[in-house]
Image (cartoon, grey):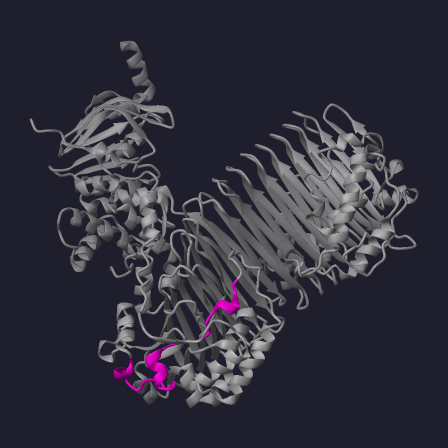
Amino acid sequence: MAANVEEFVTQRYKQGFITDIETDTVPPGLNEDVIRLISHKKGEPEFMLDWRLKAYRHWLTMTEPNWAHVHYPPIDFQDISYYSAPKSREQQNAEAPQSLDEVDPKLLETYEKLGIPLHEQEKLAGVAVDAVFDSVSVTTTFKDKLAEAGVIFCSMSEALQEHPELVEQYIGSVVPYTDNFYAGLNSAVFTDGSFVYVPEGVTCPMELSTYFRINEAKTGQFERTLIIAEKGSYVSYLEGCTAPQRDENQLHAAVVELIAHEDATIKYSTVQNWYPGDEEGKGGIYNFVTKRGEARGDRSKVTWTQVETGSAITMKYPGCVLTGNDSVGEFYSVAVTSNYQQADTGTKMVHVGRNTRSTVVAKGISAMQGEQSYRGLVKILPSATGARNYTQCDSMLIGDQCGAHTFPYIEVKEPGAVVEHEASTSKVSDEQLFYCRQRGISEEDAVNLIVNGFCKDVFRELPMEFAVEAQALLGVTLEGAVG
Amino acid sequence: MTEPMLKITNLHAKAEDAEILRGLNLEVNAGEVHAIMGPNGSGKSTLAHILAGRDDYEVTEGSVTYKGQDLLEMEPEERAHEGVFLAFQYPVEIPGVNNIYLLKSAVNAKRKHQGLGEIDSVDFLTDVKQKMKLMGMDESFLKRSVNEGFSGGEKKRNEVFQMMVLEPGLCVMDETDSGLDIDALKIVAQGVEQMRSPDRAIVLVTHYQRLLDHIQPDRVHVLARGQVLKSGDKQLAHELEEHGYDWIRYEEAESA
Amino acid sequence: MKAVDETATRMLDRLQGERPGDASDWIAGLRRDAVARFAEMGLPNQRIEDWKYTSTKAIAKRDFARPDAAGATADANRIEALRVPDLDAHRLVFINGHYAAALSDGEMTDDAVRVRNLAQVLAEDPDALKDRLADAAPADFSGFTALNTAFAEDGAVIEIAADRRVERPIELLFVSTLRDEAIAAHPRILIDAAHHGEATIIEHYVGMDDPQNLTNAVTEVHLAEGARVAHYRVQRESRKGFHIGSVHVNQAANSRLEQHNVQIGAALCRTDINTALNAEGAETLYNGLYLVNGRQHVDTHTRINHNQPNTTSEEAYRGILDGYARGVFNGRVYVAPHAQKTAAYQSNDNLLLSGKAEIDTKPELEIYADDVVCTHGATVGQLDTRALFYLRSRGVDHETARGLLLYAFAEAAIERMGVEPLRNWLQGFVIEELPHADRLQEFV
């Protein structure tokens, strides 16, 4: 059995290629001049630079978090380059390409290879894509069609040019730069990311998607995404990430902020497949991101769905602040750690408003020497009368070298609240494997089948396009396509 | 005389150093239904699991051929592809995997082995639904996770239902009657009778003869201490019921 | 000696003095090291993850004196009234940490057990404690353990013989009384069960006349192969007092521990229950009940280390919190690499009865082996609504029905306790604590 399982969990990283493209990369190092340079290159309004500098000065007073159940050598923040952009783009003076013809063919080729066609005629059915390559957005598809509906979907750089008042109003309102060490760093040096604004009453006509790609060596990726859903609107947003195979570790410290106003719904899905390092644990991405949604208006809803298979080290806790009365927060997660991957991940659900509800379903799979911790916070404030939370977190272990840990924090200050937390740890049993094999299913398929079954509650929350990708990532055939 | 479908010769097997089978011989021809009876610990379930390829047991001596092939050399899934089916005494639960998906994967794995393409979904569903009806099962069951939350009776019915869909050459049924009430027993027996065919052999492993009131076996074998002690026609089962297993032991002692 | 902060310096100064056992080199050394450890560590602060929800500032700002042995007297009738009613037990009584011979059943030695007070052993037979004192409980477990190790001067030493069952429970009654100034007692209890020895031991902490004292107790338990010990900890300190306690258990093969932890009193109570399952077949049951109101703060941290294969643990803690009370529960189950076939079940259920009460619960699993069955669960805030409806449909008014279900909630913990008189007494006690006690009496 061991051999097959091993095969299953160590499928070769297919996105590990490097695009050979000329770039404009600032030398490694971080100081106020670098921040001014980034802001200048992007032609940002004054308020943005001021905010970045305030963030930087505050960040200097902060210390790196060390409470997570992960181990890695200290990061030298002066050895990272904080800006890298494909040259062709630089020559156009930070103006986004007006059409695909202006995009470097090598970049288009890169995204083709990743299975993300940017030509609209070969579009992913009904999905608008913003492609972010190292520090900058390469192109955004379907903009015109979205504009008809009044939806703004563009890169953060563009938003700072076209809609500075919206950015100024919302940026840092959910994740202030004082929030944590990596959010502080991101606030100072973020380069690009996606911006989404859905006006009142609008249901976004298609799925929105950003595809993040780290290419250049020795760079960090610090994107910042901001999604605002006005009263009564709906938007579903997908995020995918890959990086080349490199021997050194690369830092990814993104910030995502979601704001859902009254009766609005934001559904945010991630398939994270950053390079995880090789079989010996060499190289790979450090994925230290801060993601938080605020269900600000009454009856609003924020849903996080994530499938995390990549990164050498992950510290990530997408959360919901349920401020509005009757607002809803959801978190569905599948995380896989194999080889020497380490993940400390979970969610924070903070109940502020009355009758707020949250659901957490977290499935962790550890194989080989993988180490995984679920760390979750459910906090019910005294104002959250009638709040409800249900949390289920299950771990599956494959092999006897791995670890699975659960650290849920439950803080309740409201007597009418009902909080339930359930957790279990199990393995793929020999009995289950034998049963499947007796029915003629190969051992490898049987493992896939069982793992897929284990993750089912999460996969069914993903938009169809992503569910397929997610299951393919786990090496499983799509269940439910039958019957 | 054609080669028997299943031929077991001088089979010795042990589990964790305890010898369980000690020179077992058995021949089952296509078209026949055999019952293997015996007291607890006689090695009945061990035999069933060895036929299916469970690696908890070590075969130390002897041979097993199925349709002339060396069965012991084959992986469990290969045996399944060739048509060996085990109806488990304790079918395992597989959370999150629905029944229809497991069944379709199993059917397609076998078809692939036979060089056939994937089965047509509509044909498959039609076949499945018809067989479910025979087993008195509700269609909602197809969407439920494999054996999860099933009652004992439902699990056993599900085993027979899977057997009907997979149409194996050799059906080994391990205590399929245990834990069934009379009504469920009748349905299961009907299902097995339905499977009787000139090109199929059925081996019923059972402790009690009550299943044999509903399924007429061609041969009955009594197993004790890892060997077939006595073989006969269905009359033997009745004698066993009447006299108990001690009767065999007594007879054996007499002849020794 | 330079201490980490002013509080630590002050506490060290206040607690100086001669103690039984000082004549023994190794005990004097142990104490010196512990003083040094405490000087370094000080009292735990909230920056330490294990003390995140509990502040020790209220303890730090008080000035606790060291009680003298001469003050270990009390009215026998009043002491009698504090006992668990109808409990036929061998009893040792301690007043403000000092053994009160006149109120106790005295030293006990028979073929099954030897029970002595610690001061006597320290003075007369200190070498008997070698390799046992500060073995299961390392001095640096927390600042409080260091403090206890440095200043413990009395308590109990219980040795259970091999292959023997101690028929009567052993009750250790620790009474904290009102004195001119607040005092700090550091009782130390050693329980040592030889192979296949069996006993029931009850540690019972009570406050008399609402003192603002600190009790800082440490218990060490060694279970040899096949030993079976039921250990109870019943804490009914003064509502103005402070109680810090830790229990540290090492278990050998096929041994069984039952640890029952009842927390009712004290303004601030923190208990740590730690068990190491060090050989195959060892099993542990943790059963806890906390019942607090007013401005009480009760914090329980438990840890079960499954260090070897085929070990089993079951843990169930329940709490009812009213008024402005705050509860903290942190239960950690650790499964070492290769500790296969571990089975661990943990649950923590809480009811908040008031809008000002708070519970912070953190059930943790830390697992490094794959062939294990581990589950944990935590709930806050549920009374069975169907049961509530059922009772009301049978004519029981809403408040009484609610009271009955609260009682039933606590009873689930009480019924696990094997000592019947203790059970009966706790049941009555719980009813009195619940709203509408008078009406409940008729039903239970």
Left-right relation of B182 to A191? left
Q: What stretch is highlighted in magenta?
A: A75-103
* Residue A56, picture quadrant: bottom right
Q: Position of residue B177 (x, y in %)?
A: 30, 37
Q: Where is residue B216 in the image (x, y as percent from the top left)?
A: 19, 32
Up the image or down, B133 lies above or below C230; here it is below
The residue at 64%/61% (across/down) is C359
Q: Nearer the viewer, residue B29 or C113?
A: C113
- Is residue C205 in view from this perspective? yes
Q: Residue at x 18, y 59 (%)?
A: B121
For residue A85: magenta?
Answer: yes
Q: Give the x, y percent position of residue A402.
A: 45, 48
- Is C371 positioned to the left or the right of C109 in the image? left
Look at the image and tell me in which quarter the C terminus of chain A lies: bottom left
Q: Which image quadrant for residue A473?
A: bottom left
Picture coordinates of residue C325, whole percent (x, y): 70, 62
**Left or right of B90 in this view: B77:** left
Residue sitting farthest toward the front = A27
| Figure check: C368 above or below C253 | below
> Vertical placement of C316 versus B36: above or below?
below
Quadrant into which the N terminus of chain A falls: top left
Q: Residue at the spot x=47%, y=63% of the render?
A: A360
Q: Can residue C382 be seen in this view?
A: no
Question: Does the magenta-highlighted stretch encompass residue A476?
Answer: no
